[in-house]
Image (spheres, rainbow, N blue to C red):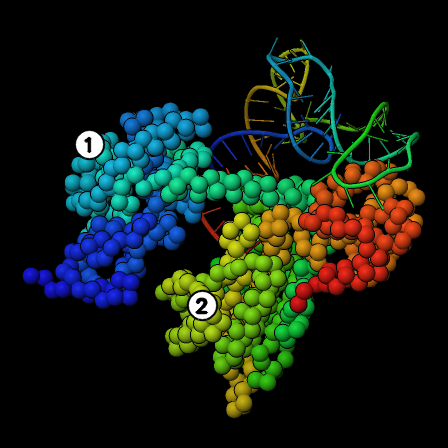
Amino acid sequence: MALAVQFEVNGEQVEREPGVRAADLTAVPEGALAVWVNGQTLDLSRPLMEGGQIQFLSFQDSAGRHVFRHSSAHLLAQAVKRLWPEAKLGTGPALEDGFYYDIWLPEPLTEKDLPRIEEMMRQIVQENYPIERVELSRDHALKIFGERGESFKEEIVQRIPEGAVISAYRQGEFIDLCSGPHLPSTGRIGALKLTQVSGAYWRGDEKNPMMTRIYGTSFPDQASLDQHLERIEEAKLRDHRKLGAQLDLFTFREEAPGFVFWHPKGHQVYRSLEDFSRRLQAARGYQEVATPWIYRVGLWERSGHWDHYRDNLFLIDRDDELQGVKPMNCPGHCLLFKSATRSYRDLPWRLAEYSPLSRYERSGALHGLMRVRGFHQDDAHLFVRPDQIREEMFGVLDLVDVLYRTFDMPYEVVLSTRPDDYMGELALWDRAEAELEEVLKARGLKYQINPKDGAFYGPKLDIYAVDSLGRRWQCATVQLDFQLPEKFELEYIDQDGLAKRPVMIHRAIMGSIERFLGILVEHYAGAFPLWLAPVQVRVLPITDNQHDYAESIARQLREAGIRVEVDDRNQKIGYKIREAQVEKVPEMLVVGGRDQENNTVSVRTREAGDLGAQPVADYLASIVERARIPG
RNA sequence: GCUGGCGUAGCUCAGUCGGUAGAGCAACGGUUUCGUAAACCGUAGGUCGUCGGUUCAAGUCCGACCGCCAGCUCCA
């Protein structure tokens, strides 16, 4: 008789024999796909040998979705094997929003083959096979996959280290080498769609045979799938590269790949973002500086960039000496810190900088504003005493909150802790990590922990903004750094008269302003809020007779700091309105003979349409109030 | 960087079997002077990404390069 083990389910303690299945512990909630036990995701039917906290995972949980998509990949493989028995399976993982499977096929596949495969997948869903886990010896696994001609699977089996459990999952006639976990049965995959095919080399190595990679996505029901596909269509329409050209914000040219040409309108938005950031930071005791953008290579050697970041440096070879264009501001700020003897009274010292940064990105990585080679950050470095970490982190998170709230973006926080190859004092790490958690709790923020994912020089917080389409973007990042002050031998004189080492906090809130602007274009579908819009108001005279009146209104608005244009082209009012709407101008002032007589403007907004006539003075007061930069 | 695809007017795109380039929108000129999402007529605009090759003849076929797109990898 084995000793009983203790489980905690839904807050209740349950005692059972080892080997019990999660499904036997309690009523399995509807929609449960897998179970989470002691940090591991397992099949619902997996025998549990040790006790612990039990949590059921549904499609709502990212781990649950992962299981769902992973089983969908198996489903895809089974369908392909039925249609092409000579196919050989590679690997088939789950992705964030779907899955793929790499499969070797005797003939290349095209998108036209996808519906046929989907059809077979649906049939297998109908057949509703239970998905069963089997554990195999190495020899047995080699025999099974050898007999089936699965040479890639044999290769994987041979790579599995000695002593590791080798498992496979079986559904109907199909079996796949896999560590799992998986759904209870194929019938759970309610709706699926194969989205694309592409080539991929086995194990990503071009010397290996070319596999066919089939991408797809799947959901518990058709409505969720449709919603997902609509979102993808919507995202395509909002693509910032497309809107950026349509709205005359920016362009790229092949003469300077990875660098942005900002048009007047785009640069206006860019500057509004920068102004907004400056106001927020000035109000929180940051001081803006400007430091050099090209340094002799020795600086980069000292900072560690030469060892860790050399491939991303733009290098200049002059006078037999290498110099590097800065990819980050931190070393410059360290040098600035050293320009005088610092007192404990000077700390925290918060240095902000918006200078251009350059990083060499490989050509395939470039992507509109989201990934460029030349950019700017709302960057700052805080030099703090160890006892100030908590308060400064609190302040940084406050800034994060104000900023994302302004753009109506919820955000998620991930704390990354000490990696195995950490540098510095263990005690400082422990204290810093504990304080970060305390700060997060004090701010009432929900956060995830990525254990051991911090940088070698300090723990970090990554903040993911969620846009209007529900996509997550990593923008803000806050990193504690114990190493750079060491490398630059930074010191301050403490109260006791002794020289001490400060801690550095690297932080950016928008991250790259270029990228953040790209995200905002997609978030707002190009329809910027009034304070950000490059043209805030357009005056539309109905006939040539109102040109002078329109100009006088524009002048008054301009003098009040409003960005205004007059559309004095010889066109009908409907035409001018249509153009202004297409260009997403937030407010239009239609002025005709009646307005001129009564000294009014007929207000039309981008969202609400015609609001009727208003006295000019009233409108002026209202727009000035509403167009103010927040913060 | 790798794999696949693409590159024709400012933009979106057509161009058949290899025979010297076309539309809509935008621009420009004129007519129209109009009250809430596209008035009408006309004009101009191209080294077909670049370089080389095949051919009597190349936007079209071949090669190299550049850039862009999707994916991989990487990341702000």
Q: What residue type is labelled 2?
A: Pro
Disc 2 chain ID: A
Which disc, if any, is residue A311? none
Q: Which amino acid does label 1 sit on?
A: Glu
Q: Circle 1 is placed at which residue position? A: A147
**Residue A260 placement, left or right of A487:** right
Identify which residue is drawn at 48% across, 60% down.
Answer: A412
Identify which residue is drawn at 30% across, 30% down.
Answer: A81
Judging depth in this view, the residue of B45 and A337 nearest the camera is B45
SS label for mark 2: loop
**Residue A403 placement, left or right of A139:** right
**Where residue A27 appears, x then y in whole percent?**
24, 55
SS label for mark 1: helix
**Where residue A211 appears, x then y in whole percent?**
38, 33
Q: Circle 2 is placed at which residue position? A: A459
Considering the image in quadrants, where does the N terminus of chain A appear?
bottom left
**Where residue A498 appears, x then y in whole percent?**
52, 88
Identify which residue is drawn at 31% across, 35% down.
Answer: A125
Identify which residue is drawn at 17% across, 64% down.
Answer: A15
For the residues beneath circles 1 and 2, the answer to whether they share a chain is yes
